[in-house]
Image: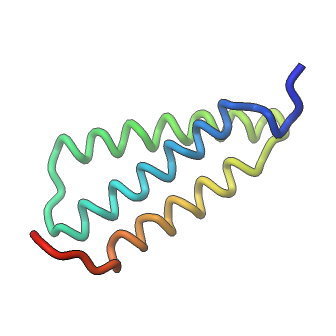
């Protein structure tokens, strides 16, 4: 049986939340949010929240905490990082 830290669903949810946060920040920094980008970001966010909340309810709260704070940090980093081009 897997230990609490070896639960892959919670960590997959963490990855989804981080990618969704970075994707949202990237779209906002380009000054244009597309419908397709918004849909992908929303789907990744919902999947990530579902997986990390499920892990949290089973007693494994680290992916949820890291996913929520990490997605905000990734979005902030993408918005305020300096990039060349459009």
Name the image quarter holding the C terminus. bottom left
* Residue drawn at the location 56% of the way across and 61% of the way down: 70
The part of the image, by quadrant, that contains residue 53 is: top right
Q: Foreground: 29 or 86? A: 86
**On the rendered structure, is 37 left or right of 71?**
left
- Where residue 13 sits: x, y (%)? 58, 39
Q: Foreground: 43 or 9? A: 9
**On the rendered structure, is 30 left or right of 56?**
left
- Where residue 46 sits: x, y (%)? 47, 38
**On the rendered structure, is 86 left or right of 77?**
left
Question: In the rendered view, would you say 66 is above or below 83?
Answer: above
- Where residue 25 sits: x, y (%)? 34, 64
Query: Which residue lies most toward the front here?
Result: 84
Say how many tags the image has: 0
- Where residue 31 sits: x, y (%)? 15, 69
* Residue drawn at the location 42% of the way across and 39% of the way down: 44
């Amino acid at each position: 049986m897997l230990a609490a830290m070896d639960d892959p669903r919670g960590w997959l949810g963490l990855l989804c939340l981080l990618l969704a946060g970075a994707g949202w920040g990237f779209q906002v920094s380009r000054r244009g949010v597309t419908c397709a980008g918004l849909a992908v970001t929303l789907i990744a966010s919902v999947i990530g929240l579902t997986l990390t909340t499920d892990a949290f309810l089973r007693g494994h709260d680290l992916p949820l905490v890291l996913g929520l704070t990490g997605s905000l940090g990734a979005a902030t980093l993408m918005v305020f990082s300096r990039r060349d081009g459009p």
